[in-house]
Image (tube, grey):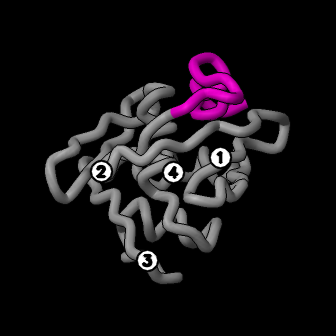
Amino acid sequence: MGPGESAIRHSIRAGESLETTAQKKPFTVDTIDQSGVALLFGRKQTRTPFTWEALEGIRTQFLHSGWIVIGGRRDVHGEPGTLDGYVKQVVNRDAAGCVASLLEEAGVVELDRARPGRMRVTAR
């Protein structure tokens, strides 16, 4: 179990409601299991799964990057070097704000909500 998975499992529960970083839109943690975390968000509460490998990859990718832009473009290609760019390689959804909030709640990242929203990985 990696540090991200451990932090999420110890601080977040299935059914918990969180809000996106910038627009404060609610989303729900649907499941946390051996394969990863699934979130429900958007008007239709679309189930969007993230594997532990993908979530741990965020920490690995950005650990020594300092502050990075969260981003969140409504197209299939995220901006390289942003959380949105990373997330769009995993799922074809505008999910960076949800993922950033999930990781903040778990203590994996610190957020700066000034525009543009930024995050940095904590030294855990």
Q: Which circle's residue, 2 or 1, is located before the other in the chain?
A: 2
| Distance from the alpha carbon under mark 4 to that under mark 2 | 19 Å
What amino acid type is highlighted by mark number 1?
Leu
- Mark nearest the camera among 4 and 2 is 2
Residue for badge 1: 39
Q: In which quarter of the image is the N terminus?
A: top right
Q: Disc 4 designates what residue?
A: 58
The residue to which callout 2 is attached is 22
Q: Name the residue nearer the viewer: 59 or 51.
A: 51
Give the magenta-colored segment's residue range: 1-17
The mark that comes first in sequence, 4 or 2, is 2
The answer to whether the residues at label 4 and label 2 have Cβ atoms under 8 Å apart is: no
Helix, strand or loop status at disc 1: strand
Three-letter residue code for mark 2: Ala
In front: 2, or 51?
Answer: 51
**Category of crowding for the residue at label 1, using alpha-carbon neighbours closer than 10 angstroms: few (below 14), some (14–19), many (at least 20):** many
